[in-house]
Amino acid sequence: MEFADEAPKLLMLLYGLVAFVVVVGGLLLLLDAVPNYFARRREQRLIAASTAKGGPGGDGPAPAARPRRGEGLFAAFFLFPAIALLLIGLVVPAVRTTLLSFMDGGSVNWVGLRNYGWMFSQPEILDVLANTLMWVVLVPLLATSMGLLYAVLVDKARFEAIAKSLIFMPMAISFVGAGIIWKFVYAYRSEEQEQIGLLNQIAVSLGGEPKQWLLNSPLNTLLLIAVMVWIQAGFAMVVLSAAIKAIPAEIVEAARLDGVNAWQMFRRVTLPSIRPALIVVVVTISIATLKVFDIVRTMTNGNFNTSVIANEMYNQAFRFGQVGQGSALAVFLFVLVIPIVIYQIRNLRQQREG
């Protein structure tokens, strides 16, 4: 490999580093200099007003409270980057994707609702929608149940911190990394070879035959769902454990004085007390599940009837060149998320008003 051949890549890398330093350094400088500028101006105005009228060196009455004219500009300065990033990264792509969903694969001609009709008329796409529904129903239910059960069992246990860290550890692994790990768990080799997959090794040890677990539907989808549950159970456990510990001790003590058993304590005291946290966990995991892509992509590439909406959207838009159909799937995914977000906002508003 000649250095001259790599010179263009190194030059592009240098351009990228310079651009990063300029943009990030410029933002940091602005965020440091502008607030200090407004703070100094406000301090000068306050000193001048106090000295001229009501301050230690003045002889007039105390100044009346006036609207702070600079605060509006000050707030706008901090809101502008967030609004600009939302427009660039969310609003503009959402509008563009919606428009593309009404166009053909080359994004040239308008086709109306044809892409949406295609989405609900193709058997393979209906299978994708059914798989996504299976993910959205099972993952929040199983992950939240496991997290809640684990949080109750290890609460105030002797090695609570260690037990929690063990189940929370998968949260530190990316979806791609988790997919690779579990792909080894489901790995298949013929009977003549030594098994390297944990599941097949257990099957062989029990006298069975090794199987290609990721080939048969719907078992393969359920095995992929297990990976997502393995990751999200730690998140559910942490949030619900914190909610359980926040239950007032007086309520728990009063319930014990009434003679409730463990199940009655869980059903009548623990569950009602942590209901807001349960809703947050279910909503958060549901939204993450609707967007699942990495696990399916890493483990099966969407083959063998395991594809979900996000994966099929990628296939249609970037592999098959059908931008309109891919955009229709993206819009449909966005529409599925909206009711969950609205429900969460209403729930948070009711909690604040209550």
Image (cartoon, rainbow, N blue to C red):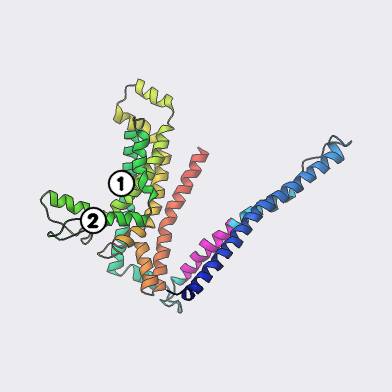
Q: Position of residue 198 (x, y in %)?
A: 21, 51
Q: What is the magenta range?
A: 82-99
Marker count (numbered): 2
Where is residue 248? Give x, y as percent.
Answer: 44, 28
Q: Amino acid at mark 2?
A: Tyr
Where disc 1 sits, the SS reads helix
Q: Residues within 10 Å of mark 2 (few under 14, many from 20)?
A: many
Q: Quadrant of residue 307?
A: bottom left
Residue drawn where x is 45% and y is 75% of the image: 2
To which residue does mark 2 refer?
186
Q: Residue furthest top?
A: 257
Judge from the rendering whether residue 150 lies leftward or rightward of residue 18; answer left or right: left
Magenta-span inclusion, residue 85 = yes
Residue 108 lies in the magenta stretch: no
Q: Which residue is mark 1?
A: 142
Q: Answer with left or right where residue 40 lies relative to residue 213.
A: right
Q: Of the residues tagged 2 and 1, which is closer to the observer?
A: 2
Give the image location of residue 251, x and y in percent. Answer: 41, 26
